[in-house]
Image (cartoon, helix red, strand yellow):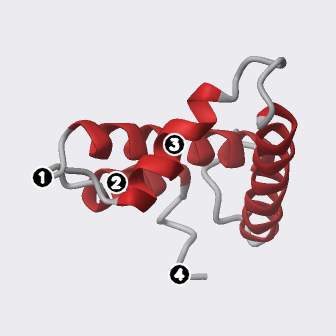
Amino acid sequence: MWPPATTTTDLTPQAATQSARPAHTYFVERYERERAQFAEGFHDESTRSRLREGISSESAAFLFHAALNGRQLHRALDQDLDIVGPVTDFVHLLFDHRRADD
């Protein structure tokens, strides 16, 4: 049995992808707001030359957001799945660790 928070968090966005759905506007705005917040954080890292060369803060934010959403779906399908390790590995792909200590 899924915990109620998991069910609500994971399934509602997929159901709201159609513009006729009542929650559609809410989720469009939520995703735009979250991506903007992530982009701001990645921009700060980019100004410190910590993002891997060639990856924009906007692209990093989009990819990170997608990874988080994908992780939720996989967790819903398999409660025993390690979701922290793969997301941590993904974040490592975004950063240039040679410059992270500067």
Quadrant where the C terminus lies? bottom right
Q: Do the residues bearing badges 3 and 1 touch, measured as CB atoms within 8 Å?
A: no
Give the class, few, some or many, for how many residues have Cα within 10 Å of label 1's Cα (few <14, many ≥20): few
Residue at point 82% right, 67% down?
A: 47
Circle 2 residue: 89
Distance, label 3 to label 2, CA atoms, is 16 Å
Q: Position of residue 49 (x, y in %)?
A: 72, 64
Instruction: Label 3, secondary structure: give it.
Output: helix
Q: Position of residue 39 (x, y in %)?
A: 79, 56
Give the class, few, some or many, for how many residues have Cα within 10 Å of label 4's Cα (few <14, many ≥20): few
Q: Position of residue 53 (x, y in %)?
A: 66, 46
**Which of pointers 3 and 1 lies earlier in the amino acid sequence?**
3
Circle 1 residue: 80
Residue ranking furthest to the left: 80
Vertical arrangement, residue 56 with respect to residue 40, above or below: above
Residue at point 48% right, 44% down?
A: 10
The label nearer to you, 4 versus 3, is: 3
Place residue 44 in its image quadrant. bottom right
Q: Which mark is residue 69?
A: 3
Instruction: Label 4, secondary structure: give it.
Output: loop
Distance, label 3 to label 1, CA atoms, is 17 Å
- What's the amino acid at mark 3? Asn
Residue at point 49% right, 37% down?
A: 11
Distance, label 4 to label 3, CA atoms, is 29 Å
Q: Do the residues bearing badges 2 and 4 touch, measured as CB atoms within 8 Å?
A: no
- What's the amino acid at mark 1? Asp
Circle 4 residue: 101
